[in-house]
Image (cartoon, rainbow, N blue to C red):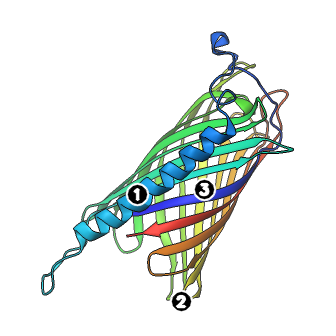
Amino acid sequence: MAIQCSMGIFSQRGLRPCFADPYHPDSNGTSLENVRGSEWRRVAASTAIVLLFMAAKLRADETPPPGSTTTIKPWKDTGEVSVVSANGNSRATTTSAKNTFLYHWTNTSLELVGEGMGSSSGNQVTAEQYNASEKVKRTLTGSNYVFEEGGWDKNRFAGIRDRYSASAGVGRLLMNFTRDKLTGEIGGGYIHEERTDAPQNNFPSGRAYSKYSHILSPTATFSQDAEYLHDFTNLKDYRLNMETAVIASLTTQLSLKASYTWKRVGEPPPGFGKDDTVTSVALIINY
């Protein structure tokens, strides 16, 4: 089980500011902007202390007595929390939280992911997005497997009120060397997209995905994820999601992760940009 406490720089391109949720006019934009920077700092400090205490406590609880035999747990849970606050001549706050749960059976695995991110500058909300997904994989023969996945995401600053997706396909471990691994997936599905200022966008989709990882040294690893989603009803429309990351071990329990995420939409909702990027540095606690 691992907990990630991260500090990051979140760059949202092509997004337009908003003081309140247009679909909840009574909120007056109080979801983030009425919380002062000092309160965020207290939340960040409290969260870090709690996470460190949990890590130490659970590690102590799971340490087997001398001479005992242990078995590998079939599950793994990774939590990530980030709070960045700037005050003084400029006042800005960015928060994010993410949790990934994995469970492995003999030939099947389940992955559940939930994530949320918000950012404000002064009294103005500049970004707010949420997503959740599930994925099930079933091993066939050798390095081949089949999968199904479903997801939901919301990003009103990119013009997306709610988006639901479902897909299924086949995957394969294409390369499996000591220091290099490459996985590829291909499949199809359907996307239902509700936009804030435009009609719904529903379409059958095609999906291609790959993940490459390389061991740079005994204490450092590089990874590259790339996902392409195609709109079969509009040849100019697509979704491209990419993440580049480097993880370096500091100690046996601590690692440092630097990542860059780029998301691009071929034909975004009217008035919104095509690109969103997130750059972050995360401290990972393993136990």
Q: Nearer the viewer, residue 214 or 38?
A: 38
The kind of residue tagged 2 is Pro
**Of the two numbered discs 1 and 2 in the rendering, the one whose residue sits closer to the viewer:** 2
Relative image position of residue 192 (x, y in whole percent): 58, 29
Q: Position of residue 76 (x, y in %)?
A: 35, 61
Q: Do the residues bearing badges 3 and 1 touch, measured as CB atoms within 8 Å?
A: no
Query: On the rendered structure, is 174 left or right of 237?
Result: left
x, y percent for residue 61 = 23, 66
- Mark 3 neighbour class, 10 Å CA radius: few under 14, some 14 to 19, many 20 or more: some
Query: Which of the two discs, 3 and 1, labels the residue nearer the N terminus?
Result: 1
Q: How many marks are shown on the rendered structure?
A: 3
Farthest left residue in view? 68
In the displayed structure, 174 sits above or below 118; it is below
Return the x and y of residue 119 as percentages of the image width and height: 70, 39
Report the residue marked by disc 1: 146
Identify the residue at horizontal 82%, vertical 31% (top origin).
16
The residue drawn where x is 82% and y is 45% is 88
Q: Which residue is mark 2?
A: 218
Residue, disc 3: 208
Residue 259 visible somewhere in the drawing: yes
Foreground residue, 48 or 230?
48
Res. 166 visible in picture: no
Q: Image quadrant for the N terminus?
A: bottom left
Q: CA distance from mark 2 to mark 3?
A: 31 Å
Q: Nearer the viewer, mark 2 or mark 3?
A: 2
Does 31 sit above or below residue 264?
A: above
Label 1 crowd (10 A; few <14 / some 14-19 / many >=20): some
Residue depicted at x 67% and y 26%: 34
Q: CA distance from mark 3 to mark 1?
A: 13 Å
Instruction: Decide which of tag 1 and tag 2 comes sooner along the chain.
Output: 1
Identify the amino acid type marked 3.
Ala
Q: In which quadrant of the rendered image does the C terminus lie?
A: bottom left
